[in-house]
Amino acid sequence: MTETSLNLSLIIDIGVTLIFLFYGLKLDPVKLRAGMRNWKMHLAIQLTTFVVFPMLVLPFYPLLQNTSLEIFWMGMFFLAALPSTVSSSVVMVSIAGGNIPGAIFNASISGIIGIIMTPFWMGLFLSAQSADLDFSHVLLQLITQIILPVVAGLILHKFLARWTDRHIYKFATFDKIIILLIVYESFSKSFMAGIFSSVSWIALAGLSVAVVILFFIIMNFTRLLAGVLNFSREDRITLQFAGTKKSLVHGSVFASVLFGTISTAGIWLLPIMIYHSFQLFYISIAARRMQMDETL
């Protein structure tokens, strides 16, 4: 490995640590405790995010295992195992007239749960993908780069809350820079290993279709679930929007920790990148439509 790649990996490692430190700083323990009251909606959103999503993708593994499409399945499963996104969920719920405190709580708690659930789901299959993967090293990275920074941020929140609020937009810019570096490094490794040379445009088109189908299955599932549970209009909107969203930020940083030594990491990031773009496009339209319906 060259000195340049070592420096880039070090910058990314430090960046990932800071992202989760800032994430912890933005979490208000008082608001989190207050937000726990609407437990039925919270449970529905988190079960959709971390159980329903993966269980929809999981049955296809025996069909695609040991085939050229297994690599795409891993990317889809990684997408399904990710937590919900924070900022866009809250913004879209606000536009549509949903339960904003519920959206904030679930987006925040989803990131915390994802620290455990995403590595758990991926750990079931990573050993089969890379015989050289050192899980003790991955576990150490999870603790030092994700868990400890979040805990430190939570502890420091009461001392740095005002400073955090003043620099919230700078944190978002920093997140985007680190994401770009992670994506660049992942795709560079995949290109250098010749992974993309064997990927056809038909396969990429099929992957895009699969991602969109997964999105609409979850979108309709959450709508039906809200009806079964007799949710109010506000809670239904929050369940649909927060339950269908997946975080590119968490996807990128988790990929850096979990797949850092795996050459196929670039392809594994493709589904979440496609999903992220489509979810923003579709849900922004849906939110505006709901806003207009409410005013009529």
Image (spheres, rainbow, N blue to C red):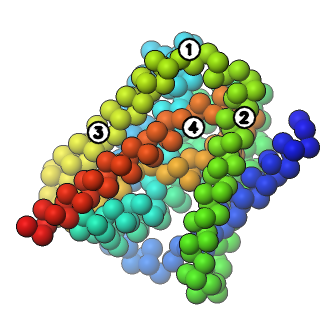
State which tag comes first along the sequence, 3 or 4: 3
State which tag comes first along the sequence, 3 or 2: 2
| Mark pair 3, 2: CA separation | 32 Å
Give the residue number, with chain letter if any, for mark 1.
68
Callout 1: SS: loop
Dot 1 alpha-carbon crowd within 10 angstroms: few under 14, some 14 to 19, many 20 or more: few
Residue at the spot 61% in from the left edge and 64% down from the top edge: 173
Residue 188's disc is 2
State which tag comes first along the sequence, 4 or 2: 2
| Mark pair 4, 2: CA separation | 12 Å
| Mark pair 3, 4: CA separation | 20 Å
Residue at the spot 57% in from the left edge and 65% down from the top edge: 172
Q: Judge left or right: residue 89 versus residue 111.
A: left
State which tag comes first along the sequence, 2 or 1: 1
Residue 216's disc is 3
Callout 4: SS: loop
Residue kind at label 4, given as amino acid type = Leu
Q: Nearer the viewer, mark 2 or mark 1?
A: 2
Give the residue number, with chain letter if any, for mark 4.
269
Residue at the spot 39% in from the left edge and 43% down from the top edge: 278
Q: Judge left or right: residue 3 versus residue 119.
A: right
